[in-house]
Amino acid sequence: MQHSLVNRFRGALLGAALGEILGINTDTQIQNQTQRSWLEVERWGFEAVETPSLWGKLAVTQLTALVEGKDSPTLPPTSDWGVAIALLPLILYYHEAPDILHRQIQQALSNSPPAITEGCQQFGHWISLALREQALLPEVLKAHRTSSLLFSERMPAAARVDFPQAIVSHPFQITLLRVARHSGSRVETAIAGALAGSIHSLTGLPPSWRQQLQHRSIWDLSNESELLHLADRLFVSWSGIHLPFSHSPTLPVALPITLPVTAAPQVIRPPT
């Protein structure tokens, strides 16, 4: 099924946020040795988290820099795969130019270990393929046996075998639940959420999960609406409209423009 690109932008960002929160709450269950039914995941999987999301906040910083036409900041040196989430806005913005995307990731991670840079390049390539509606499954299958980007020591070997097929072919909800159950890692569920969200778009995210975040802070933003608004601004900036706000001499503040009508790519509809 084809989806509009703006909805893929929204799905990738919100999917990453949903995945991270689910991963944090799943990890809390594991650490506390409590068992709560996965049939009730809407109740406990998206409870407010106490641990602030460093990489989510940096993703918002990247988002803001891109929509304002500023240079993307170099990320702090790290050996944490969570840095892939901080790079997500950069990946979305340069998704159609793989060579430029590769250089941008290289520059942003110039102070990080080569293995982290290589894994984030792989993640960026997968997101780029999903947004351009290219064949993604063969690329994931080719890399999954050796990559540590999506797999923790907690995930059983049996679960790794069919994981690539699951993340590409299954609905968003099924993908995230499988990763959370086998991994319990906030990083892996966030990365899986970003990838699945870019494939299935915003419309593929479960409404019951999103409802839990309507009045809850996400990545240092007030709620889901603020994150989606930034996703829209990123799309507008990517499309070539470099002034996403209209200014009026009679108004003291800038008003956001109405997002242009968008459709699924490569679809031509006859006039009605």
Image (tube, helix red, strand yellow):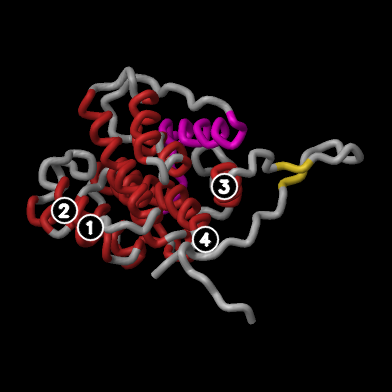
The alpha-carbon separation of the residues under discs 2 and 1 comes to 6 Å
Tag 2–tag 1 contact (CB < 8 Å):
yes
Task: From the image, tell me which residue sits under label 3.
Answer: 239
Left or right? Give the position of 272 relative to 265: right
- Mark 4 lies on a secondary structure that is helix
Tag 4–tag 2 contact (CB < 8 Å):
no
Task: From the image, tell me which residue sits under label 1.
Answer: 137
Quadrant location of residue 120?
top left
Residues rendered magenta in the picture: 46-69
- Mark 2 lies on a secondary structure that is helix
Tell me if residue 179 is in the magenta stretch.
no
From the image, state whether disc 1 or disc 4 is nearer to you. Answer: 1
Q: Residue 150 at x, y = what percent?
A: 23, 44
Task: From the image, tell me which residue sits under label 2.
Answer: 141
- Tell me the amino acid under the disc marked 1: Leu
The alpha-carbon separation of the residues under discs 3 and 2 comes to 31 Å
From the image, state whether disc 4 or disc 2 is nearer to you. Answer: 2
Task: From the image, tell me which residue sits under label 4.
Answer: 211
**Residue name at image x 16 percent, y 40 percent:** 147
**Mark toward the start of the polypeptide (1 vs 3):** 1
From this view, report whether residue 119 is shown above or below residue 177. Answer: above
- Tell me the amino acid under the disc marked 4: Gln
Tell me if residue 55 is in the magenta stretch.
yes
